[in-house]
Image (cartoon, rainbow, N blue to C red):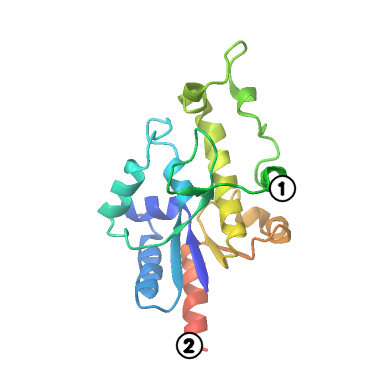
Amino acid sequence: MKLTLDWNCVIEVEENRPQAENVTELIKFHRLGHFEVALLAASASENTKSKRFPGNANVFKERISALGWQDLPLVPMPGIFGLSYWGFSYIVGDGEKFERDRDAIWRVIAPLVPRKPADHLPDGKLMTDDAIQSEELSKWRNTWCDVISAYSHIQQGRDVFVTNNTKDFQKNASELAKLGMKHISTPAEALAIVERIRTD
């Protein structure tokens, strides 16, 4: 079984939130060889606390290393100019299919959020590399990261998407299942699944 941890699982442990112990238990099972637990390459593109794009993957690498998780595998993401990093992404073979699949996920997770980043900029401001990485597009990038995380998980045929983002994921689980997202669980729910399978 393959589990995918989204970015809020990292934050959960960094800030010692209530689900932190469940996340660390999942990683323990991974290291014992019982299941695979992976991080998302898309997480490296998540906003910093200043609401800006990180600019490089070093921020992600440093935070993961600080937790001692540098041995965890990465779920690769599609390469998107200005928003992904070399070595963390792959070239999409069929761009039209990628856009259809991405848009289908976007409609489920964030139907009220316009998909084009330019729609989130003030009138008259041009879409540039700097603009797409600016604080003004931080909310759009949050949604984009959720969508690309889901897309990456689905494309790699993984089994359980682990997240505390119940608003966007668990609430829409039935619709996301139709798109290939088999199971969506909180860390506690994922741990219960793992322990049940181990004892069966």
Instruction: Please name which of the two marks, 1 or 2, marks the residue nearer to the observer.
Output: 1
Give the residue drawn at x 37%, y 70%.
Answer: 25
Q: Quadrant of residue 156?
A: bottom right
Residue 173 vs 87, above or below: the answer is below
Image side of residue 55 versus residue 184, left or right: left
* Residue 167 % position (x, y): 59, 49
* Residue 98 % position (x, y): 67, 46
Give the residue drawn at x 57%, y 20%.
Answer: 127
* Residue 158 % position (x, y): 57, 65
**Residue 112 visible in the current orientation:** yes
**Circle 2 residues within 10 Å: few <14, some 14–19, many ≥20:** few
Farthest residue to the bottom: give it. Answer: 200
Identify residue type, mark 2. Thr
At mark 1, the secondary structure is helix
Residue 136 vs 145, above or below: the answer is above
For disc 1, the marked residue is: 97
* Residue 123 % position (x, y): 62, 12
Residue 140 vs 125, above or below: the answer is below
Residue placed most toward the observer, 167 or 93:
93
Give the residue drawn at x 66%, y 58%.
Answer: 173
Residue placed most toward the observer, 81 or 132:
81
Residue 190 vs 8, above or below: the answer is below
The CA span between labels 1 and 2 is: 41 Å
For disc 2, the marked residue is: 199
User: For the image shown, how many numbered marks are present on the structure?
Assistant: 2
Residue 126, disc: none
